Amino acid sequence: MKRLFLVSSMHGGGAERVAATLANAWARRGDEVTLVCCYSGRGRCDQTLDPGVRLLWLADRVRGPAWLRPLAKLAALRRLARECRPDQVLSFLTNVNVSALLALRGTGLPVVVGERTDPAHSVNLESSLRWLRRWTYPWARRVAVQTRRSASHLLQVAPGVRRVAVIPNPLPDGLPGCRTHEPVGPRHTLAALGRFNHVKQFDRLIECFATLAPQCPDWDLCIWGDGAQLEACRTRVRALGLESRIRLPGFSRTPWEDLAAAHAFVLNSRVEGFPNALLEAMALGLPCVATDCPSGPSELTLGGRLAELVPLDDEPALARALCRVMCADPDEREVRGRAASESVRARYGLDAVLRAWDDAWTETDGMLGAEREDDASRTRP
C-alpha cells in the first residue's frame, strides 16, 4: 500500500505526534509511506520517524514570486502526488486539508482529511478558510474527526459532507506501561502539560492552585510547556510568592517520564481537539482532573467515571475536585489510576485505531466509528 500523508509540520505538538505514530505504524507494517510537511516556512522535524518513512518538505518544491506562492504550492502538491502515485492520501489540519482537496481535485486519488480540532471551536480560522472548508470537504472520500461531539459540529460547518469517521488519537509509540505505584517522597506533584495560551487556561489553573496551596502543603504544581503566555504566568507566580510551589520549567522533551514522576494530572482547557496529554496521563496511571470541555474529556473519562470531570468555567468545582484528589489516600489514587489506564489502553490502542483508519477509505456513506465509541462509553471500568 502506498500512502501519501500530508501534515503542516513535524514540530512538537500533539497532531504531529499522532502523525508520527500513524506513519511509523504503517511503515512497520510494510506500507510505503511518504510524509510531507506543507508548512510554507519548511521548519524542522522534532518527531522520531521509522527509517521506512520518507519525509519531504513541500517548500523545497515551491518556486516563483511570493504573490504566486499559494497557486505554486497547489501545483507542487499535485506534481508530488503524480510522482508518488499513492493508493491513499491522508491529510491533517484544516488548511492542509483544503489545499489537498483543491490540488488533487480531478486526479481520482482517494483523499481522507482529518480535522484535529472541534470544528465548532476553530476560532483561529479566517473566514475564507471557513468558506473553503465548507466548499471542499464534500469532495473528500471521508472526513475524520476525533470525537462524536466533533462529528455533529462538523456537519454544521460543512453540511454537504456525507461520509464521516470518528477516529480517536492512538496511544503513541513507546509510551511506557502503567506505573505500578505512585512516586514516594515528601513532596507531591500535580502536573499539567501543553502550550501556554488562552485555550489551555494555565493562568487560571495557577490562581486555583494558589487558593489550595495552604490546604495541601505537601503538593506542588508543575506545568510543562511553552507559548505566548509563559512569561506572564511566571511573573504571576512570582507576584503570588509561590516560586517554590509552582514550577514552570518550559517545554519538556521527556513528557512521559515527567508525567510518570507526578502524583496527579489536571487538564483545565477551554476547548480541545482531542486531549492527548490527558490520554497519556490516564494511560500512565495518574489520577486525573479535567474540565468537561469540547471535545474529548467526557469520552475519555466515560462521563467522569474514570476521572474527576468538572463543568467548564466552574472554578469552585475545579478546586473541589483537585482537593479531593490531592487529599485522597495514596492507595485510592493508585486504584483509580490503574482503572483509567486499563480502560484507555483497551479503547485507544494503536491496533484498534489503525483498523479505524483502514476503514476510512471505504465508500460507505454515513458515519463510521460512532457505534464503536458508544459501546466503549457504556463499558464499566
Image (spheres, rainbow, N blue to C red):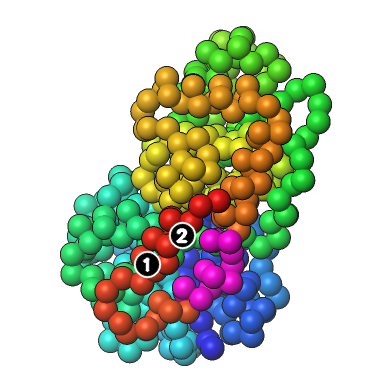
Q: Quadrant of residue 194?
A: top right
**Amino acid on which the number 2 mark rests in the picture:** Ala
Front in this rendered view, residue 330 or 108: 330
Image point (72%, 42%), residue name? 260
* Residue in front for this viewpoint, 313 or 123: 313
Label 1: which residue? 371
Which stretch appears magenta? 346-357
From the top left corner, tell me how far across and down residue 102 is, in percent. Answer: 29, 74
User: What secondary structure is found at the residue carrying circle 1?
Assistant: helix
Tell me where residue 241 sits by quadrant. top right
Most distant residue in the front direction: 380
Categorize mark 2 by other alpha carbons within 10 Å: few (<14), some (14-19), many (20+).
Answer: some
In percent of width and height, residue 105 lies at: 29, 81
Q: Does the magenta stretch include residue 356?
A: yes
Three-letter code, disc 1: Glu
Q: Mark 2 points at which residue?
A: 376
**Residue nearest the viewer, comparing 56 with 85:** 85
Q: Pinpoint residue 180: horizontal percent, then vertical percent.
A: 77, 45
Query: How many neighbours does mark 1 have within 10 angstroms: few (below 14), some (14-19), or many (20 or more)?
Result: few
Residue 71: tell me if it is visible: no
Q: What element carries label 2?
A: helix
The quadrant of the rendering that contains the N terminus is bottom right
- Identify the residue at image location x=78%, y=35%: 183
Residue drawn at the location 40% of the way across and 39% of the way down: 292
Disc on res. 28? none
Residue at left offset 36%, top offset 72%: 368
What's the distance in space between the residues labelled 2 and 1, CA to CA?
9 Å
